Image (cartoon, rainbow, N blue to C red):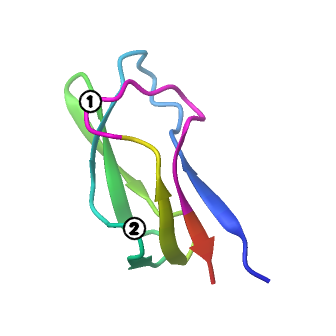
């Protein structure tokens, strides 16, 4: 059985986080720990890693979207 695993915004210690860009496209396969997207906070770019191995099946964030901790950015269909 496969699961859908969300990619979420961690607590970044800033209330001014925005989405940067995706490094993978819908349907791309990723391995847990691979860089999938980036989040911007004042003075830093933070790469977010895939929380599971599988295929990216959903992207819910676009460049410059404001972000909050726990917000779902996308989903991986786990192997």
Residue 55 bears which disc, if any?
A: none
Question: Percent x, y for residue 57?
Answer: 51, 66
Please name whichever residue, 60 or 43, is drawn nearer the observer in this view of the structure: 60
Please name whichever residue, 40 or 28, is drawn nearer the observer in this view of the structure: 28
Residue 64 bears which disc, if any?
A: 1
Q: Secondary structure at mark 2?
A: loop
Left or right: residue 23 compared with residue 26: left
Which quadrant of the view contains residue 49?
Answer: bottom left
Question: Percent x, y for residue 30?
Answer: 43, 76
Span of residues in magenta: 62-75
Work out whether residue 32 can be spotted.
no
Q: Quadrant of the C terminus?
A: bottom right
Which quadrant of the view contains residue 64?
Answer: top left
Considering every residue shown, the one lying at the far top of the view is 15
Considering every residue shown, the one lying at the far right of the view is 1
Instruction: Say which residue appears at 80% left-offset and 83% top-offset.
Output: 1
Q: CA distance from mark 1 to mark 2?
A: 19 Å
Mark 2 neighbour class, 10 Å CA radius: few under 14, some 14 to 19, many 20 or more: some
Query: Which residue is the site of mark 2?
Result: 26
Question: Percent x, y for residue 48?
Answer: 40, 52
> Which is nearer the N-term, disc 1 or disc 2?
2
């Amino acid at each position: 059985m496969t699961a859908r695993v969300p990619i979420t915004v961690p607590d970044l210690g800033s209330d001014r986080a925005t989405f940067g860009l995706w490094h993978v496209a819908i349907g791309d396969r990723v391995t847990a720990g691979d860089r999938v997207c980036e989040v911007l906070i004042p003075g830093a770019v933070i790469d977010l890693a895939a929380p599971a191995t599988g295929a990216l099946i959903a992207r819910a964030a676009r460049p410059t979207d404001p972000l909050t901790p726990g917000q779902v950015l996308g989903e991986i269909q786990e192997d």
